């Protein structure tokens, strides 16, 4: 089995300064030292206990979902053998209690696994960003986008199976080391996605065990490996991850913290691309092959090639939804779709 040798491009940053061209690209970039000035990162040099004390001073006491796994799980949050159930428990609990558990487990050779995934800072640590924050040099747009989200991830050693997210992502390593294994979006078929639901964490994941890939079951996985790249982060580093890039995330230390920023530059009224996928599964997948290919040509013409070109030959007043959408047209289009689906 070959291994990935390509390393993700690295840019050395002054604390808090992101070159604007990084976020306008479509490639992952490591931003070395981007958040090294954060108090959270600097406290980590004193040890995990100092970080826990600091976090608890900003915690508002609200409960959250916590993933728990038995010692044999080794932090690999995945499916059971049937692929219809998850291999870990989800419980409701207090963040400060989990942090204390993680401290107690640090010296154990094979501790249980505990993981708090993608907790909004505004929900559980509302004052933390006052001293631990950066400004994203996003392009200025004239329309409303989805609100930005800032999340925190807490746990001991873990492996988040390879998946993609529809949002732009800046992942900031605060405590412990992280390894991201990255693949461009066109590698989806070589990564063998699992069920659409249920899923660990809400996203479709690759079914391949990267450490021990079953090449009889997943024969094209080496093609993904050939296209992959590795991004290794130390505390203070960040990774810009464009939307739709596949990524496996390994938290490598006995205590790990990551804070990430999610955002979108698309108009808010566009909604989720997953709606298109589910609609296509309903409307197109089971049609005869010649019909599917015909619809592929139709979608290429209107959506995937140059969407502006599809209506350019028409007078502007006749373009309708083939012209530039505004929020009102988007509402009308959504209402029409709902009406047709309900017939």
Image: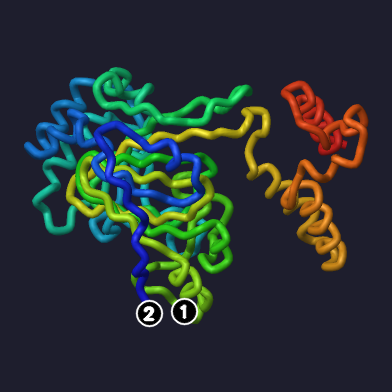
In the figure, is residue 322 to the left or right of 223? Answer: right
Q: Residue at x 35, y 30 (%)?
A: 64
**Front residue of 58 and 86:** 58
Contact, mark 1 vs mark 2 (Cβ under 8 Å): yes
Look at the image and tell me whether residue 159 can be seen: no
Q: Give x and y (percent) for residue 341.
A: 82, 38
Q: Is residue 334 above or below residue 13?
A: above
Q: Residues within 10 Å of mark 2 (few under 14, many from 20)?
A: few
Disc 2: which residue? 1
Q: Is residue 131 above or below residue 224?
A: above
- Quadrant in which residue 296 is drawn: bottom right
Q: Quadrant of the N terminus?
A: bottom left
Element type where label 2 sits in the image? loop
Mark before the other along the chain sequence, 1 or 2: 2
Q: Quadrant of the C terminus?
A: top right
Look at the image and tell me whether residue 226 can be seen: yes
Q: Give x and y (percent) for residue 235.
A: 21, 43
- Quadrant in which residue 284 is drawn: bottom right
In the figure, is residue 234 to the left or right of 214? Answer: left
- Quadrant in which residue 9 is drawn: bottom left
Q: Residue at x 36, y 41 (%)?
A: 171
Image mark for residue 215: 1
């Amino acid at each position: 089995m070959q291994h990935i040798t390509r390393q993700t491009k690295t840019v050395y940053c002054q604390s808090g300064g992101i070159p604007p061209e990084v976020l306008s690209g479509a490639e992952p970039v490591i931003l070395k030292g981007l958040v090294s000035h954060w108090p959270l990162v600097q406290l980590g040099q004193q040890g995990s206990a100092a970080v826990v004390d600091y976090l608890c001073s900003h915690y508002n006491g609200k409960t959250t979902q916590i993933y728990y796994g038995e010692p044999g799980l080794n932090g690999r949050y995945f499916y059971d053998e049937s692929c219809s159930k998850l291999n870990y428990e989800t419980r409701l609990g207090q963040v400060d209690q989990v942090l204390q558990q993680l401290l107690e487990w640090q010296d154990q050779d094979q501790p249980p696994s505990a993981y708090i995934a993608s907790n909004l800072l505004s929900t559980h640590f509302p004052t933390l960003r006052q001293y631990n924050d950066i400004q994203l040099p996003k392009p200025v747009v004239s329309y409303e986008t989805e609100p930005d989200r800032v999340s925190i991830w807490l746990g001991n050693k873990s492996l988040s199976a390879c998946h993609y997210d529809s949002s732009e992502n800046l992942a900031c390593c605060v405590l412990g080391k992280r390894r991201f294994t990255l693949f461009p979006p066109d590698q989806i078929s070589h990564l063998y996605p699992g069920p659409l639901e249920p899923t660990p964490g809400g996203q479709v994941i690759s079914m391949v065990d990267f450490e021990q890939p079953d090449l009889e079951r997943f024969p094209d996985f080496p093609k993904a490996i050939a296209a992959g790249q590795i991004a290794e982060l130390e505390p203070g580093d960040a990774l810009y991850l464009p939307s739709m890039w596949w990524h496996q995330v390994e938290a490598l230390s006995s205590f790990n913290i990551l804070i990430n920023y999610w955002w979108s530059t698309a108009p808010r009224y566009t909604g989720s691309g997953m709606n298109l996928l589910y609609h296509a599964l309903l409307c197109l997948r089971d049609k005869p092959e010649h019909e599917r290919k015909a619809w592929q040509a139709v979608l290429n013409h209107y959506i995937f090639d140059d969407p502006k070109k599809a209506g350019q030959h028409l007078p502007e007043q006749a373009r309708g939804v083939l012209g530039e959408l505004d929020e009102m047209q988007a509402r009308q289009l959504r209402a029409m779709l709902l009406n047709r689906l309900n017939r």
